[in-house]
Amino acid sequence: MNDLKKFIDYLTYERHFAEHTIINYKKDLTEFYRFLDKKNIKDIDVTFLRLYLKKLYDNKYSASSISRKISALRSYFRFLVAENKMDNNPMILISNPKKERKLPTFLNVNDLEKLLAAPDLNTADGQKEALILELLYSTGIRVSELINIKVKDIDFAERKILVLGKGNKERYVYYGSKASQLLDIFIHNGRKFLPASDYLIPNKHGQKLNDRMVRLMIDKLARKVNLNVHVTPHVLRHTYATHMLNEGADLKSVGDLLGHENLSTTQIYTHVSNERLRKVYLDSHPRAKK
C-alpha cells in the first residue's frame, strides 16, 4: 500500500490531477487491493485482471465506472513499471468496455439565468459565488482549472485567462462583459475579506479552493432557486458548449476552447443542438414557412 500512497502523491503533485479524480482513483485502487488479498502485486497477470473485471461485471457496475477503474489500474501499473517495481504493465492487454453514450445534461436559458442570479452581490460570499458561476459558464472551464487560476493568469485588457488543463496543457479561454464586471466587483470588494493570495479565488486560509466546496456551493444555490436539475460544475461546462453551438459556433473552435484533444469528444454536443437545426429549417425552408 506504500506504493499506492506514492502513486497518489505523484498524481497530486506532479501530474496535478483534479482532486475529484484522485479521490476516485484512490477508492478504485483500494478496492483492487482488497480483491488482491495476500497476492503480491508483482505476480499480477492478465488472467487475474480478467477475473477482477468479471467480478465488477457480476456486481453490475456501469460501463463508465468500469472504464474509470481500468484507467486507474492502467495508470498505476504504468507508474509501478516506471518505478522499477514491475517488469511490465499487464493492463496493456485489457481494453475498456464499450461506453454508454449519454447525452450531456445542460441548463436551458431560463434555469441558467435563475442560477446566475442566485448569489447576493451585497455580500462578500455572494460576490465570490457569482464569479465562480459566471466563470464556469462564460469560459466552459473545468472546476480543476477554475480553482488553479491565479491573478497573474488573467489578461484583463484582452479578457482572457491562461488555464492549465488535462495533461498539464495550457490554453487561453475568453470571458465577456458580465464576467469582467463580476471580476471587478470581487477583486475590489469581496476578495479583500480573504487572506492575501496568488489565487484568484482563495479559501479562507489563502490557499487553493477545494473543488468539493465549489460543488457544494453550486448545489446549494441550485436548491435555493428550486431547479429540478442536479447542477454540477460539469453541467455548466456542458451548458457553455451547448449554448455556443446553438448560437452558431463551429465545432472545432468550441473543442479548442474546451481543451478537447479530439473532435469526437466535442461531437456529443451536436446531439443536443437539434432544436437549433429545427429552428433553422423552419425559418429557412420555403415549404416549412407558414
Image: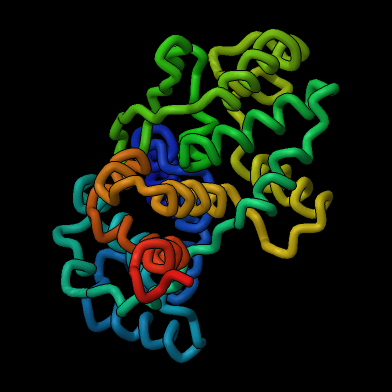
Q: Is residue 214 found left or right of 41 in the rendered image?
A: right
**Residue at screen point 31% across, 61% down:** 267
Q: Nearer the viewer, residue 135 or 249?
A: 249
Query: Is residue 39 placed above or below 123 in the rendered structure?
Result: below
Number of numbered tags placed on the structure image: 0
Q: Is residue 260 found left or right of 189 in the rendered image?
A: left
Query: Is residue 102 placed above or below 255 in the rendered structure?
Result: below
Place residue 107 in its image quadrant: bottom right
Q: Is residue 65 visible?
A: no
- Image coordinates of residue 217 in percent, x first then y, are 73, 43
Q: Nearer the viewer, residue 76 or 197?
A: 197
Place residue 86 in its image quadrant: bottom left
- Image coordinates of residue 228 in percent, x first then y, are 74, 64
- Image coordinates of residue 263 in percent, x first then y, are 24, 54
**Residue at screen point 60% across, 34% down:** 134
Q: How is the image coloured?
A: rainbow
Q: Is residue 122 visible?
A: yes
Query: Is residue 8 placed above or below 205 in the rendered structure?
Result: below
Q: Is residue 139 found left or right of 218 in the rendered image?
A: left
**Residue at screen point 40% across, 36% down:** 16
Point out the residue furthest to the bottom here: 58
**Residue at screen point 32% across, 66% down:** 41
Report the quarter where the N terminus lies: bottom left
- Image coordinates of residue 271 in percent, x first then y, are 39, 68
Q: Nearer the viewer, residue 105 or 210?
A: 105
Q: Is residue 137 found left or right of 55 in the rendered image?
A: right
